[in-house]
């Protein structure tokens, strides 16, 4: 058994509760009576809840704006996304190839005979049946991405067995509406 040090004795004697007769509880009745209004405490609580709600909504708005703005396109991407073409300069029955986002876009000013030819194709003769009306907004203009559906080659315009496009990579033939008619392309 080890004897207690003087410091330990002081700490123990100071931490002991005094006798009940010598200990007096302070009286707070006068303070409590002044602030006994329940609405006063509630209004403060409502104010704090409202302020925290306002701060939380401002933080959420800032977080959402930051997240959405990180997904928007940059200025250089937007500049590449816009291509203007003078359609009046394209003669009837001719193709124009425009580069859009690094890919070729075929624009064809179709003749009335080509429009009639595209509309007269039987759907059963097509690998991917789609009417000409589904492929164009204005029948005299055919605008499509100029990439072969087989392996991504660029077809040659005004060539092939159907008067549309021909892909020299694997021999796919497209009609005047850009639909695959012959060859390995799906």
Image (cartoon, helix red, strand yellow):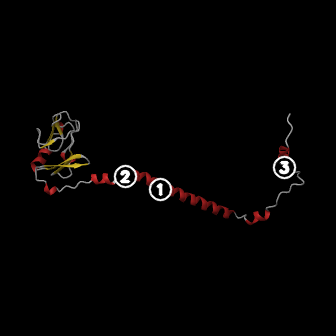
- Which residue is label 1 attached to? 62
**Is there CB contact under 8 Å for labels 3 and 1?**
no
In the image: residue 62, left or right of residue 23: left
Q: Secondary structure at mark 1?
A: helix
- Residue placed most toward the observer, 119 or 153: 153
Residue 48 pos. (x, y %)? 60, 60
- Which residue is label 3 attached to? 14
Residue 73 pos. (x, y %)? 35, 52
Tell me: residue 28, above or below residue 145.
below
Residue pushed farthest bottom? 34
Marked residue nearer the N-terminal end (3 or 2): 3
Q: Secondary structure at mark 2?
A: loop
Residue pushed farthest right? 21
Residue 124 pos. (x, y %)? 18, 37
Quarter holding the C terminus? top left
Measured in 3D between alpha carbons, the distance from the residue under mark 3 to the one under mark 2, in whole angstroms, is 68 Å
In the image: residue 8, left or right of residue 96: right
In the image: residue 72, left or right of residue 157: right
Q: Which mark is residue 165?
A: none
- Residue placed most toward the observer, 127 or 150: 150
Residue pushed farthest left? 113
Measured in 3D between alpha carbons, the distance from the residue under mark 3 to the one under mark 1, in whole angstroms, is 54 Å
- Which residue is label 2 attached to? 72
Graded by Cα atoms within 10 Å as few (under 14), some (14 to 19) or many (20 or more), the crowding at tag 1 reads few
């Amino acid at each position: 058994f080890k004897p207690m040090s003087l410091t330990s004795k002081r700490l123990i004697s100071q931490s002991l509760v005094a006798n009940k007769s010598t200990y007096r509880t302070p009286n707070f009745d006068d303070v409590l009576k002044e602030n006994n209004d329940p609405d006063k405490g509630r209004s403060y609580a409502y104010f704090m809840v409202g302020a925290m709600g306002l701060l939380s909504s401002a933080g959420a708005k800032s977080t959402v704006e930051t997240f959405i703005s990180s997904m928007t396109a940059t200025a250089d991407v937007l500049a590449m996304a816009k291509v203007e073409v003078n359609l009046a300069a394209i003669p009837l029955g001719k193709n124009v190839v425009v580069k859009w986002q690094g890919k070729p876009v075929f624009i064809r000013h179709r003749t009335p005979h080509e429009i009639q030819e595209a509309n007269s194709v039987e759907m059963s003769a097509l690998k991917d049946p789609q009417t000409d009306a589904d492929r164009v907004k204005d029948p005299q203009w055919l605008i499509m991405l100029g990439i072969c559906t087989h392996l991504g080659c660029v077809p040659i315009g005004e060539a092939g067995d159907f008067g549309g496009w021909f892909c020299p990579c694997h021999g796919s033939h497209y009609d005047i509406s850009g639909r695959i008619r012959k060859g390995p392309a799906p």
